[in-house]
Image: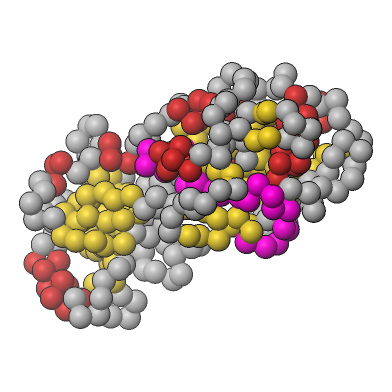
Amino acid sequence: MEARLVKALPTDPGWWFEPKWDGFRCLAFRSGDEVDMRAKSGKPLARYFPDMVDTLRAMPLKRFILDGELTIAVDGELSFAALQMRLHPAESRVRKLAAQTPATFVLFDCLIDDHGDSLANSSLVERRGQLEAIHRHGLSSSHLRLSPGTTDSEEAADWLAKIGGALDGVVAKRLDGPYAAGERAMLKIKRQRTADCVVGGFRYETGSRQVGSLLLGLYDEAGKLDHVGYTSAISDAERPALTTTLEALAGGPGFSGNAPGGPSRWSNGRSAEWTPLQTRLVVEVRYDQVTGDRFRHGTTLLRWRPDKAPRQCTLAQLRSETAALLGEALGPSRHVRKRGKIESGQGSNRHADG
């Protein structure tokens, strides 16, 4: 089941809210001693997460299908980069990383019951009850967690307002909704955050002598300017004048810390060549997610900030604003939230989860 992006949280009754974790979406299957793990694309993940395969195989249940998010916490923050490092062709390297930075599976749905019968047409309330029952069998593992959740839209709005690097937004699901595989039956709401960045360099458009993208930097604790991303949200009308301005500042130090590298497999042929600038220009950009103190995607240019001193543009802007939700889901196992709890089909009250 997938989600479609909307601008705001729904406020009418009947919704279930949970954090949108910054990890790998994963379906985990078990039948007897066989454990399989699949990404949203259908690609196998089990060979890259042997630690999680062992965790799932150690559970005293012989059959389940679980939906959740594979995460890795490093220094109290979820690290998407650590997840990407697991996708290594050498088994020895994967097992070394699994021992150094074990993964945690944050659970938010269940597709079959303890008899092996499908729950796809059951409501989220019913699936939630089964998920809790399965999770109780895995409580001895510190790497199997239930995601916090709530039926309170105000609480979900508070999560969204305080989102830091651990989260990618908030997801909303209908309490009475089935598990609609392949459909965008959930809603996802992302907080578009902003940051003031130094323009440390630029790239020309491919096959042109006009600016194509601005290279963005932020100062670290040592006073070094690190490259953190780019913006190419420049209108055609702006390009000629902006190119003239940038070329007049060419020849500066550019990035004194981490500098831009060559094009990646996601760069769509963008040139690796860039021009360093004198660090005088500051822009405000809008971004959606951060990985390893860098913008994961291209940013949107909002405005120029001539009123802002470049040295005021620091990496502190990108650091997580709250660790509360991360601590709830990945800290010591416990019932997480009594507010906004789901009523199970048997009339019992359970703590919130997605």
Q: Residue at x 14, y 52 (%)?
A: 279
Q: Residue at x 31, y 56 (%)?
A: 286
Whether 217 is drawn above or below 152: the answer is below
> Residue 227: horizontal and vertical position, in percent?
30, 49
Q: Nearer the viewer, residue 156 or 305?
A: 156
> Residue 336: horizontal and vertical position, in percent?
58, 25
The answer to which image quadrant residue 65 occupies is top right
Magenta stretch: give its range.
Answer: 160-184
**Numbered marks: total:** 0
Residue 269 seen in the figure? yes
Q: Residue at x 19, y 61 (%)?
A: 303
Q: Which of 184 and 219 is in front in this view?
A: 184
Look at the image and tell me in which quarter the C terminus lies: top right
> Residue 187: horizontal and vertical position, in percent?
55, 55
In this rendering, would 52 be left or right of 192?
A: right
In this rendering, would 310 be left or right of 83?
A: left
Q: Which residue is drawn at 65% across and 47% down?
A: 175
Magenta stretch containing residue 167, yes or no? yes
In this rendering, would 119 be left or right of 349?
A: right
Magenta stretch containing residue 162, yes or no? yes
Residue 97 seen in the figure? no
> Residue 313: horizontal and vertical position, in percent?
19, 44
Whether 343 is drawn above or below 269: the answer is above
